[in-house]
Amino acid sequence: QVQVAESGGGLVQAGGSLRLSCAASGSIFVADVMGWYRQAPGKQRDLVATMTRGGISNYDDSVKGRFTISRDYFNNMVYLQMNSLKIEDTAVYYCNLRGRANGDFDSWGQGTQVTVSS
């Protein structure tokens, strides 16, 4: 079973920065796509950014130019550098891993809270 766990959330003032980390662990697997989603209170879970095994990244328009996703392929980690944070970035951020082990899988972390204050 493959698991992912996030870290790095917290409280920050608008305009500040935070870096989220996510580590994948478990049995032998291939991590095809790793990424970040977020869910604000009363809203659905939305894409923030993803990166494929080949290094192709995809961002939601609302974070382009402010957030940067990166991966450590050897250690099966994914990071989200968040700069110029806005109050509307406040949400629970979830790490997601889609890959292959004994079949395809789709793993989610427990989430980490990011709160941006004025």
Image (cartoon, grey):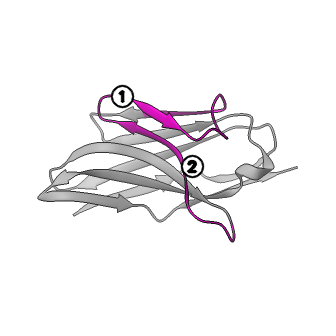
Front-most of 7 and 108? 108
- In the rendered image, the quadrant that contains the N terminus is bottom left
The answer to which quarter of the image holds residue 112 is: bottom right
Q: Answer whether residue 105 is magenta in the image.
A: no
Tell me which residue sits at (65%, 28%) in the image.
Answer: 65
**Residue 105 location (% of width, % of height):** 25, 59
Tell me which residue sits at (52%, 62%) in the image.
Answer: 111
Q: CA distance from mark 1 to mark 2?
A: 23 Å
Q: Amino acid at mark 1?
A: Gly
Q: Answer whether residue 42 is magenta in the image.
A: yes
**Residue 13 location (% of width, % of height):** 81, 45
The residue under label 2 is 8
Q: Which residues are drawn in magenta?
A: 41-70
Front-most of 23 and 58? 58
Q: Is residue 13 left or right of residue 102?
A: right
Tell me which residue sits at (65%, 66%) in the image.
Answer: 43
The residue under label 1 is 55
Q: Is residue 53 left or right of residue 104?
A: right
**Residue 107 location (% of width, % of height):** 34, 60
Q: Secondary structure at mark 2?
A: loop
